[in-house]
Image (spheres, rainbow, N blue to C red):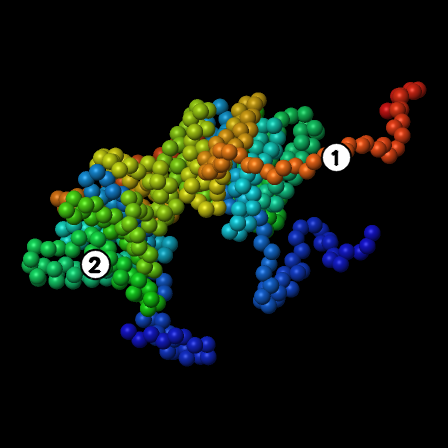
Amino acid sequence: MTFTIPIENGNGVKDAEADSQRTLYPYVTGTSVVAIKYKDGILMASDMGGSYGSTLRYKNIERMKAIGKHSLLGASGEISDFQEILRYLDELTLNDNMWDDGNSLGPKEVHNYLTRVMYNRRNKFNPLWNTLVLGGVKNGEKYLGMVSMIGVSFEDNHVATGFGNHLARPILRDEWREDLSFEEGVKLLEKCMRVLLYRDRSAINKLQIAKMTEEGVTVSEPYSLKTFWEFKAFTNPTVGAEGS
Amino acid sequence: MSQSAVDVPPKGGFSFDLCKRNDMLTQKGLKAPSFLKTGTTIVGLIFKDGVILGADTRATEGPIVADKNCEKIHYMAPNIYCCGAGTAADTEAVTDMVSSQLRLHRYQTSRDSRIITALTLLKKHLFSYQGHVSAALVLGGVDITGPHLHTIYPHGSTDTLPFATMGSGSLAAMSVFEAKYKEGLTRDEGIKLVAEAICSGIFNDLGSGSNVDICVITKGNNEYLRNYMEPNPRTYVSSKGYSFTKKTEVLLTKITPLLERVEITEVGEAMEE
């Protein structure tokens, strides 16, 4: 991959060429992903929208995918980069299967691999414009981690990307517990997704929830949340001051 | 009185004459003085009998906490209070100004102030300064037409809402409100929810911190609960207290009067009115 540092005095054509080789801005983006550890494994939620700038271009994008038998990857940010990452992980799992020794990559290994990939791309000034959420269960151990586009990676009991950082994290910090049941976990995630639906302009009311346990991954069918708009101040905002 | 070196702008408002010179100075490397911002989480909600306003108490100057316990809920009228976020001087000045305008208006009309009066005075002022007066306000109160809650943005736009949050911690507080607000809350439920929203701002936003102030306004009554909650106490306080070095010894006490004290008794008639 050619990479030249652009210089001030008019190597115009060469700079344009170099720039077209690396990611400068994201084009089709997915919004937040929220994930929590619960009693039996990991629960992850994301909506199905892909925005092209300020247009809602795609309404059927699955932003959560199973990786091998033990992991679940969710992504926000540039969709094409997410698809590229899925290809890299496909190669990894294929190589695994070729060894045919019963071993497979666990979530910790996949997380580490992704961290290295993201950080190295960032060092070359050509990032994969994603924030990834990696969850999984292997041999009874639950794992939930996050990697950002500049290579910041960490592990936690609950993670959120994009707008979820500001809107979902406070709720999760307050209400997450070690021993959530499946129903409680789904309710907690739906609470977060509802707030995001109200307050994130690129969110849509069509979401999926993915469950990862020792048995495997299940991604739910898309469904929508109920919203409430009947506040008195919304229906009649000018009470007492008609005409303002 | 000496002539001031800088001309006073002829029609009031800001004078932008020095902007070019300031730009030149910053290019040469001079750092402009930063101003005290209130970082902040401010919230308001309408409950069954009126309005509850809440605010944190941290004032920041860049990365430093300048005031650990400032007051962000400003008095406008006995039945109207206003929380302010943005530049501390701007919120203080603009609320004081409108508060005194409201009082003069009350004297003239012999009626309690209405929230929409305060709203219009504030939005007119802020709009005329085109956003340069950096005050983002949550205005709430109860008047003859009922409870009202409004938000006012620095450029002069306003909203009428059942619950509102402003400031850097507004997303953290709004997530609590969106998840838990219902209409017709009782006073205790409302206070609990407001405290929860402010705490969410305090613990999840770096620009907000310290204590929670709450103001409950109902018909004919208001309660200003300063430092309603103090979730950030000093962690370690020495139980032995402090021991200061021994005081200096007092050798002699002598009082020398400088002037003869003269007693004046009222004689004659009282002053003319």
Viewed as shown, does residue A201 lie left or right of B44? left
User: Element type at marker 2?
Assistant: helix
Name the disc covering residue B187, or none: none
Find the distance from the CA under tag 2 to the CA under tag 1: 87 Å
Viewed as shown, does residue A87 lie left or right of B29? left
Same subunit, tags 2 and 1: no
User: Element type at marker 1?
Assistant: loop
Q: Name the spot of residue A23 as percent of width and height, x first.
A: 33, 65
Q: Quadrant of the N terminus of chain A?
A: bottom left
Q: Quadrant of the C terminus of chain A?
A: top right
Q: Say which of marks 2 and 1 sits in front.
A: 1
Specify whether residue A99 is in view: yes
Please name the amino acid that badge 1 sits on: Leu
Residue at figure coordinates x 65%, y 39% from the top left: B97
Name the disc covering residue A86, or none: 2
* A24 lies above or below B260: below
* Residue holding disc 1: B251
Please name the amino acid that badge 2 sits on: Leu
* A84 lies above or below A60: below
